[in-house]
Amino acid sequence: MIRNLLGAAVVVVTGSLPALAEDWSGQVTPYVWAAGFGGDITPFTGAPTLSFDKSFSDVVDDLDGAFFLSGYARRGELVFMGDLSWSSSSKSGLVPPGLPAEGKLTQRSLTLLAGWRAVNNQGFTLDLLGGARAWSIKSSVSVAGGLMQASPGKDFVDPILAARANIAMGPQWSAVIYADFGGFGVGSENTSQVLATVNYEVKDNLWLSFGYRQLNVDYRSGGTEVDVHMGGPLFGATWQF
């Protein structure tokens, strides 16, 4: 079982891949996601519900680090996609009756999908996929220098159904629209994701992408409730091989 993975996301892919019946083709995309966060979190039974709505500038102030990487591979009509996301944030302050406190939230996700190219026209392709997204959400709270502390965390896996469309817009331009939906009460109650990018071919095997990504998850189990959404613009660079 995949451990310590939280999520998000979905895959940033650009350009059209050669339709080779026997040879593999693929691409790798590191990307920056300027995501804001909003929603409600109840870490455990009896704990207060934390409601928040942060813009990307607020998130950056508290960000310790982040890493996002996606990949895509195809052979003939068979397609595979994957996405790895990690972010860690911390914040310090005071809690009643004026005690110093520090909190940290770490999120990881790994999405793995496989599917089939259902439509393969010159200017339009459509991939239909299924797979899973493994999540890990871990938070820690320390009050008065460790006098009181707690580190609740949850790991779970969601089944996912997805579709990805690639639309040719010109000799060097394309658009990608991706959507997935899952959970179905197996891991979370539900999770969904939408991504749209406009892609420009800088040179052979190198594309730049600009777009928007929205990721939602609603998880409820054992007194823990996480109902959050993350959304914002993204920028990526894709190397094809």
Image (cartoon, rainbow, N blue to C red):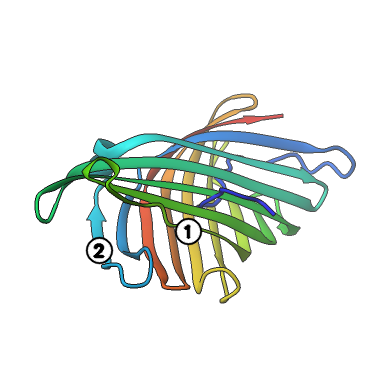
Quadrant for the C terminus, please.
top right
Residue 239, label in figure: none
- Marks counted in the figure total 2
Q: CA distance from mark 2 to mark 1?
A: 23 Å
Left or right, 175 with reference to 223: right
Residue 210 position within the rendered picture, expressed as x and y whole percent measured from the top left: 43, 40
Q: Nearer the viewer, mark 2 or mark 1?
A: 2
The residue that appears at 51% across and 43% down in the rendered structure is 85
Residue 200 position within the rendered picture, expressed as x and y whole percent measured from the top left: 51, 34
**Amino acid type at mark 2:** Ser
Residues packed near mark 2 inside 10 Å, few (<14), some (14 to 19) or many (20 plus): few
- Residue 190 vs 100, above or below: the answer is below
Q: Nearer the viewer, residue 3 or 60?
A: 3
Quadrant for the N terminus, please.
bottom right
Residues packed near mark 1 inside 10 Å, few (<14), some (14 to 19) or many (20 plus): many
Q: Nearer the viewer, residue 101 or 218?
A: 101
**Amino acid type at mark 1:** Val
- Residue 241 vs 12, above or below: the answer is above
The residue that appears at 54% across and 40% down in the rendered structure is 170
First along the sequence among labels 2 and 1? 2
Q: Looking at the image, which residue sits at the far front?
A: 147
Question: Which residue bears the numbered disc 1?
Answer: 194
Question: Which residue bears the numbered disc 2?
Answer: 51
Residue 98 position within the rendered picture, expressed as x and y whole percent measured from the top left: 9, 50
The residue that appears at 12% across and 56% down in the rendered structure is 96
